[in-house]
Image (tube, rainbow, N blue to C red):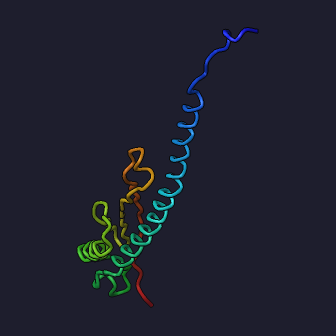
């Protein structure tokens, strides 16, 4: 066996280590930024629920007289939900959908990333919807 027959493999470990570091950074970024996005998703879900509940409180008073089923005052319900979301500094997607005695609100928020920004993902957008029904109190 002569020394001249050996194949040089200079730099092969450098490529392997560089790829491993990039993979590790992506995994860490998904862990950190993903958990922040999950927390934001839960927060936005709660805001959508509360905005829908607030809107569902806006009953059309005339619908509750005479034993009728309650319905919503559409303009008041939409305004109430929009005011609630405006106070949270998140964004409402479209306008609240009022259908008889139910209202659906969709809320969106953008979460800036920390680690994933290194690979070009600067933010994660989360969107949640909630529906509430108006009910006549007893």
The quarter holding residue 98 reads bottom left
Position in image of residue 84 (x %, y %): 31, 76
The quarter holding residue 130 reads bottom left
Q: Compared with residue 89, is residue 68 higher up or lower down, i.e. above or below?
A: below
Side of 35 relative to 73 (left or right): right
Position in image of residue 88 (x %, y %): 33, 73
Position in image of residue 33 (x %, y %): 47, 57
Tell me what residue is drawn at x 32 percent, y 87 percent. 65
The quarter of the rendered structure image containing the N terminus is top right
Tell me what residue is drawn at x 28 percent, y 81 percent. 60
Position in image of residue 61 (x %, y %): 29, 85
Q: Compared with residue 66, is residue 52 higher up or lower down, i.e. above or below?
A: above
The quarter of the rendered structure image containing the C terminus is bottom left
Pick the front one: 19 or 132: 19
The quarter holding residue 45 reads bottom left
Pick the front one: 112 or 46: 112
Q: Residue furthest right?
A: 1
Pick the front one: 94 or 3: 3
Q: Compared with residue 117, is residue 72 higher up or lower down, i.e. above or below?
A: below
Q: Compared with residue 7, is residue 37 higher up or lower down, i.e. above or below?
A: below
Tell me what residue is drawn at x 41 percent, y 58 percent. 126
Tell me what residue is drawn at x 60 percent, y 31 percent. 13
């Amino acid at each position: 066996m002569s020394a001249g027959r050996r194949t040089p493999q200079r730099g092969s470990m450098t490529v392997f280590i560089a790829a491993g570091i990039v993979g590790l950074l992506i995994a860490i970024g998904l862990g950190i930024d993903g958990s922040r996005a999950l927390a934001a998703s839960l927060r936005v879900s709660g805001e959508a629920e509360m905005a829908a509940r607030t809107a569902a409180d806006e009953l059309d008073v005339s619908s509750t007289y005479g034993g009728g089923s309650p319905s919503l005052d559409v303009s008041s319900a939409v305004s109430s939900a929009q005011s609630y979301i405006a106070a949270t500094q998140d964004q409402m997607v479209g306008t609240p959908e009022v259908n008889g005695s139910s209202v659906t609100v969709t809320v969106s928020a953008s979460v800036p990333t920390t680690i994933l920004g290194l690979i070009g993902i600067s933010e994660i957008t989360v969107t949640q919807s909630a529906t509430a029904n108006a009910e006549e109190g007893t």
